[in-house]
Amino acid sequence: MRLTGRSEEIDRLHDLIGAVREGGTSLVLRGEPGIGKSALLEEAAAFARASGISVLTTTGAESETHLPYAGLHQLLRPMRGRFDVLPPAQRAALRAALGITEGTVTDGYLVALAMLNMLADTAETRPILIVVEDAHWLDPASADVLAFLGRRLESEPILLLASARTGTASRWDEAGLPELAVPPLSGHDAAALLDAGAAGLSAALRARLLAEARGNPLALIELPAAIEGTDGTALLASPWLPLTTRLESAFTRRFALLPATAKAALEVAALNDSADLTETLAAAAAVIGRPVTAADLQPAADARLIAGDGGRLTFHHPLVRSAIHQGTSAERRRELHRALAGVLADRPDRRTWHLAAASDGPDEDIAAALEAVAVRAQRRSDGTAVAAALERAARLTPDPERRADRLLRAADAAVELGRPEIVHRLLEEVGRLDLSRQRRARLAWIKAAFEDGLRDGSTDAAALADLAESVAADGDVDLAVRILWSAALRCFWSEPGMAARDRIVDAAERLPLDPLDARLLAILGYAAPIARGAVVIERSERLLEQSVLDPQTVRLLGSVAVLVGTFDVAMAQSAASLDGLREQGRLQLLTRALAAQAWSAAQLADLTVALPAAEEAGRLAQETGQPFLLGLILATQAKIAALRGQVERAAELAAEAERIGTPVGARNVLATAQHARALAALAEGDHPQALARLLRMHDLADPSNQLALSCHTIADLADAARRGERPGDAAGVLARMEVAAKATTSPSLHDGLRLARALLAAPEEAEALFHAALAADLARRPFVRARTELAYGEWLRRQRRAAESRQHLRAARDAFDALGTSPWGDRARRELRAAGERSGERRTASSDLLTPQELQIAQMAAQGLTNREIGKRLYISHRTVGAHLAKIYSKLGVTSRVQLHHALV
């Protein structure tokens, strides 16, 4: 009866279950309360079991949202014996997350990867259906893990089905999973359902019930029961109420008729953050002063308010719980929470939350206990629980200074979550307190740290430097470094002005830090990429000579290398940090490392590195909630497309990046997008447009001007100016860059200037300058050398020295072909033809045949990595890797890893 009128939805679910052995997917059922989502999930689970598929279930509960991994704990209870199949780090992370051990989870994504690998391994012998009911109330840590899993099931015999309430905000809103809206029943089906359960209604009452229910199955079943034994006059005469309110009212009336013992037990259950029947009965006994047994709950089961399931007590529908909760007075709720706390002596986190809910005023003992809860949540890498526990602790803290500290720590945790609404609310509250200088500095730093300061107009970079100095004077050097790093990042994302940049550098160099401290080098490189470029480059080289560096230090060195123009170092160190960051599950930092690798590889036209790095960085930026970094990655992908001659695609990607970067003035995004458009114009031979765009990048008033990134466009600028016959337009920029080059040893800047001097020189000076440019060590920068060979060959041909030009043009053509930069390769061919030599067509490269992700997997497989090792690196399962390799082998016409290696070479 509950599935009346749902044949279309049932068929859809049956089709997904029937196809799961060939490959999995996920589906979120959306609908209002009572629309039938639970009934559909029950039907799917029954059909799956009948089809020989394992079923794992979990149900979100509003009272459990503060408990880290509570949903995962439910789901994985039957799989505890499978944990040993996991690699040690993943196994330890999963056990720590579930509270089985006291270990630390470095990042929640490591838990997600462990879950993916364990389920994928298990599903090899028997497919799995995961059912998540009331997903909107799942604790955030579990929701994040399941959403991560749901995005990676295409090649797994695993199906994820979840139900979520329409209009209730949750993590699932931005999970990016397929959805199915469960609509109200048609008029015909609604009438059939009503008549099946409530025959004999008067015509007027039947019509009113159909109108009130509006096709909602739960209402069609429960509202008639609410008026059973009456003539329905009260319902007919009542004013209009929302359907949810009517249903809750129906459940409340049914609850009111229960015996006192059953009512007390259900009141406890409505507040309990577990469905454990023993806990509920014990707490109810404490409330009423005598033993309570399961038999005492039979009247509630008969009234269709609860259901018993092997030691668990669950409500017939979530609206039953909310109806009982809302009908309980505040004083009564505190009494019930105290009773629950009394039976949870062996569950300190849950006990503390119930004690907090039972408190009616400040209580330092409970606040301190909540602080301990936050510490344990931090070990499990659950930032949401950390922020929630610290905020509640602050509310209960009598001492204003401790309250400020706890609010600031809660806000700091919310920054890492990417939750601006929580950050702003907490900072607004703490800002009303009387703060010490150090706490006010922390408040300003937290504001500045959020989204790299792009949305914070209240604290400028120079003010942050002042704050850092004051904090350092109070002895907190670590906080001072973090504040200065926030200030330095503003120099990358926006333009604070030279005075602010100098102020940051001065404050940083005054700190008592090791000169080789990677944090100091990063601050100097971001704030003063030219003025301190030589210092950063030299010290980075010395630091990299040390034998062992942690992945985060290596990532910082790779990142700052982009700013100071050592792109080969940026590529190498970003790549070197990846394995460690993947192993630790630090996806946010991994995304930044990949973005730096992609940007530097694109600048060097190393497309076999740039393509997969940018693709993975883009996926992870979306997954980890870094929208402005995503803008930078999209702009980088636009550059890659331009280098490959995909002009329309470059324009699309640049426009998308600009839509993200323009509203917040993200200069690095806009500069990279502008550079991409200029490269696309060069690829098409539109030299005036290319010149105009490049000049904008050097206009201090233009939003696309970024101090460091503009330095890496000099060769392009000179090329566009010469070929557009406007060399004078570039003279001013080149003069400024010559001055800058005296302050930094940046290879990128000096490479660009050597080529620019030759391109724009008078005929009698050009040849010597070309020789000087070619004499430079460009072994690790083949695109720069190829462009120099091309420019020199073009110059020789114009000097009527065609025979001499050919060797340089050939070298340029072959290098461009190898790199995949087809517009420049075509240009070299045209010049060779004009010099009297014909060229064959460029051979199709592997990177042209494969998607970026396929290219990445192919490269790893060719290096000898197993499918499991590749899956571990890319946060996908080994089955997914195998499916990709099958496509790769087919596209490249190979059958083994050895042949794959040769095909890629």
Image: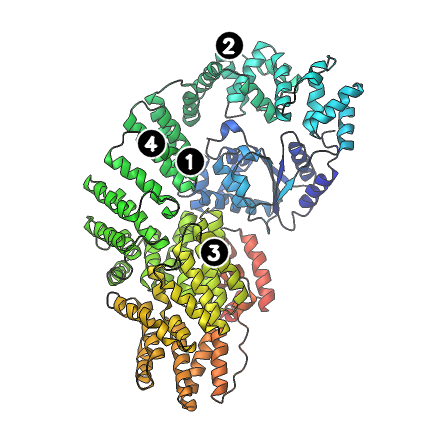
Q: Residues within 10 Å of mark 1 (few under 14, many from 20)?
A: some
Along the viewing direction, whichever of 363 and 544 lies nearer the viewer? 363
One can see residue 10 in this view: yes
Task: Give the residue type that dot 4 points to.
Answer: Val
Query: What residue would you read off at disc 3?
Result: 657
Between circles 3 and 1, the one closer to the viewer is 3
Question: Vertical placement of 840 versus 183: above or below?
Answer: below
Between circles 3 and 2, the one closer to the viewer is 3
Along the viewing direction, whichever of 83 and 325 lies nearer the viewer? 325
Q: Dividing the picture into quarters, in which one does residue 262 lie?
A: top right
- In the rendered image, residue 621, in percent from the top left (x then y), is placed at 46, 51
Q: Helix, strand, or loop for circle 4?
A: helix
One can see residue 894 in this view: no
Q: Are marks 3 and 2 in contact (CB under 8 Å)?
A: no
Query: What residue would you read off at disc 1?
Result: 422
Query: What residue would you read off at disc 4?
Result: 430
Question: Vertical placement of 679 versus 769: above or below?
Answer: above
Sequence-wise first label, 4 or 2: 2
Q: Residues within 10 Å of mark 4 (few under 14, many from 20)?
A: many
Measured in 3D between alpha carbons, the distance from the residue under mark 3 to the one under mark 1, in whole angstroms, is: 27 Å
